[in-house]
Image (tube, rainbow, N blue to C red):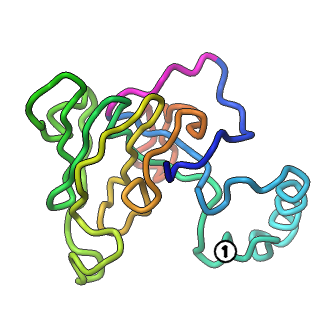
């Protein structure tokens, strides 16, 4: 699958498998596989340059971050499809598709407007064909669907790539608290 192989990153202790609706951090597919010595030197360069220099130029000037936070929409065994930026899910053994927000125990908002006014012409279009998730595969989507790089572009993500659940929001400060 497009989620890549197992990550060298270790997961948080006591990490349970993610549930539908959870926000989870994962290593960006574009930065996955960078070795520890390079990441350490890069961290030092970024620290001493106040985030202006990096061994990996795509991580500066608004490029690709090393860690992404995405919403778990599909679980292993689910069949997923998308229409109008909203996911429809048919859990294993079910006969009907159900809207993603109706299946999540956690309420969340999804932005479904057109990306920069381009709508369906963007590479991250609002439609996605049916996809059956295999064992250990998760379908992750950003909440800002028109402008999100997520499973629509890089495919399902294996459990090994997910770092931990998101439990605390600290920015913006007015929304500080448990997630």
Left or right of 136 on screen, residue 62: right
Seen in the picture, residue 16 relative to 101 is either above or below; the reply is above
Name the magenta segment's main secondary structure: loop
Asked which secondary structure carries label 1, the reply is: helix
Q: Is residue 16 magenta?
A: yes
- Please state which of residues 10 and 166 is positioned toward the viewer in this rendering: 10
Q: Quadrant of residue 115?
A: bottom left
Q: Which residue is mark 1?
A: 58
Q: Quadrant of the C terminus?
A: top left
Q: Is residue 116 magenta?
A: no
Please tell me which residue is depicted at 52% across the width and 38% down the height of the picture.
158
Seen in the picture, residue 71 relative to 44 is either above or below; the reply is above
Left or right of 141 on screen, residue 176: right
Left or right of 46 on screen, residue 29: left
The location of residue 65, given as percent across then percent down, is: 61, 62
Please tell me which residue is depicted at 49% across the width and 31% down the height of the picture.
167
Please tell me which residue is depicted at 43% across the width and 31% down the height of the picture.
178
Q: Quadrant of residue 135?
A: top left
The location of residue 169, given as percent across then percent down, is: 48, 41
Specify the farthest residue to the left: 96
The location of residue 94, given as percent across then percent down, is: 14, 25
- Residue bounds of the magenta highlight: 14-20
- Please state which of residues 55 and 53 is positioned toward the viewer in this rendering: 55
The location of residue 23, given as percent across then percent down, is: 43, 39
Q: Quadrant of residue 77?
A: top left
What is the crowding at mark 1: few (fewer than 14 residues within 10 Å), some, or many (at least 20)?
some
Please tell me which residue is depicted at 17% across the width and 44% down the height of the picture.
88
Disc count in the image?
A: 1
């Amino acid at each position: 699958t497009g989620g890549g192989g197992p990550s060298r990153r270790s997961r948080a202790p006591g990490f349970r498998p993610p549930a539908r609706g959870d926000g989870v951090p994962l290593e960006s597919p574009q930065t996955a596989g960078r070795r520890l010595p390079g990441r350490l030197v890069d961290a030092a360069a970024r620290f001493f340059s106040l985030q202006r220099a990096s061994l990996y130029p795509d991580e500066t000037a608004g490029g690709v971050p090393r860690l992404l936070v995405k919403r778990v929409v599909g679980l292993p065994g689910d069949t997923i499809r998308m229409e109008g930026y909203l996911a429809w899910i048919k859990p294993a053994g079910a006969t009907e598709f159900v809207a993603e927000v109706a299946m999540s125990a956690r309420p969340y908002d999804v932005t479904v407007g057109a990306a920069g006014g381009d709508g369906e012409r963007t590479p991250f279009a609002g439609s996605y064909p049916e996809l059956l998730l295999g064992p250990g595969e998760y379908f992750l989507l950003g909440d800002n669907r028109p402008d999100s790089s997520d499973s629509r572009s890089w495919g399902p993500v294996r459990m090994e790539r997910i770092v931990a659940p998101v439990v605390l929001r600290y920015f913006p400060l007015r929304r500080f608290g448990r997630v």
